[in-house]
Image (spheres, rainbow, N blue to C red):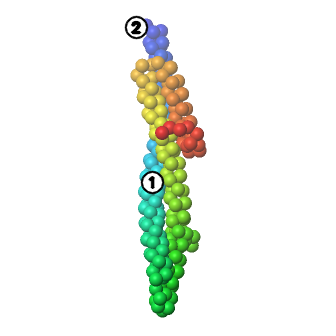
């Protein structure tokens, strides 16, 4: 090997080493993006599960309140029927007081704004929890797609080092940009694309 050939070989190796460093830096940046999207995705998934449990609990509470209200209303209606057949004034007064109490209780079971535990308030709270669950689920789907894009980008960038085909690095960069867009959509506009 001549001196000229040795210098060309050294220049080529130095150029390849410089390109590999750039690709390694690209992989590091993509890995950072992957870590971010995975963390955001896990948080959104946890939020979705939490809000789903909350909504289920609130709907169960709503059903219990509705059943109680129905039972109390039925007792009040039965009391009204009994009132019509009762002739003893003391018994009528006691039965009327009981009917009034049942009706107040039924009204409280229907709406109790001070505690937020009337069936109307429970229904609104459950719907709100469902909305938050749906929001978190939409975010989760975006972050999952972003993570997949980042993983593919890392594979493509790694293949660039092995094959020396620079076009793979460019494709990796484009896939990374797609992942960044999906992450941004997950953060700011999770319902813009319907992914599920």
Residue 18 drawn above or below residue 110: above
x, y percent for residue 152: 44, 30
Residue 13 shows in the view: no
Q: Position of residue 20 (x, y in %)?
A: 47, 25
Mark 1 or mark 2: which comes first in sequence? 2
**Quick one: 101 or 37, which is closer to the camera?**
101
Q: Residue at x 50, y 20 (%)?
A: 167
Look at 47% across and 63% down and name the residue there.
62
The residue that disc 2 covers is 1
Tag 2, which secondary structure?
loop
**Pointer 1: what residue?**
52
- Residue in view at x 45 percent, y 9 percent: 5
Rendered position, 188 above or below 171: below
Circle 1: is it few (<14), some (14-19), or many (20+) Cα within 10 Å?
many
Residue 108 position in % (x across, y down)? 53, 73
Q: Residue at x 54, y 72 (%)?
A: 107
Near-viewer residue (82 or 8): 82
On screen, residue 20 above or below 139:
above
Q: Say if residue 75 shows up in the picture.
A: yes
Instruction: Look at the image and tell me in which quarter the N terminus lies.
Output: top left
């Amino acid at each position: 090997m001549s001196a000229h050939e040795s210098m060309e070989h050294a220049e080529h190796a130095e150029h390849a080493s410089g390109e590999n460093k750039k690709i390694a830096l690209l992989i590091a940046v993509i890995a950072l993006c992957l870590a971010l999207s995975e963390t955001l995705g896990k948080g959104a998934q946890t939020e979705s599960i939490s809000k789903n449990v909350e909504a289920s609990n609130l709907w169960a509470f709503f059903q219990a309140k509705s059943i109680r209200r129905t039972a109390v209303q039925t007792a009040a209606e039965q009391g009204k029927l009994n009132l019509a057949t009762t002739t003893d004034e003391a018994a009528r007064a006691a039965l009327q007081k009981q009917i009034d109490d049942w009706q107040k209780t039924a009204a409280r079971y229907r709406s109790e704004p001070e505690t937020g535990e009337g069936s109307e308030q429970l229904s609104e709270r459950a719907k709100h929890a469902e909305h938050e669950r749906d929001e978190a689920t939409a975010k989760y789907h975006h972050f999952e797609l972003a993570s997949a894009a980042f993983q593919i980008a890392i594979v493509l960038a790694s293949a660039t080092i092995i094959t020396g085909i620079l076009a793979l690095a460019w494709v990796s960069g484009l896939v990374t940009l797609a992942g960044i867009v999906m992450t941004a959509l997950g953060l700011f506009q999770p319902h813009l694309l319907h992914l599920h």
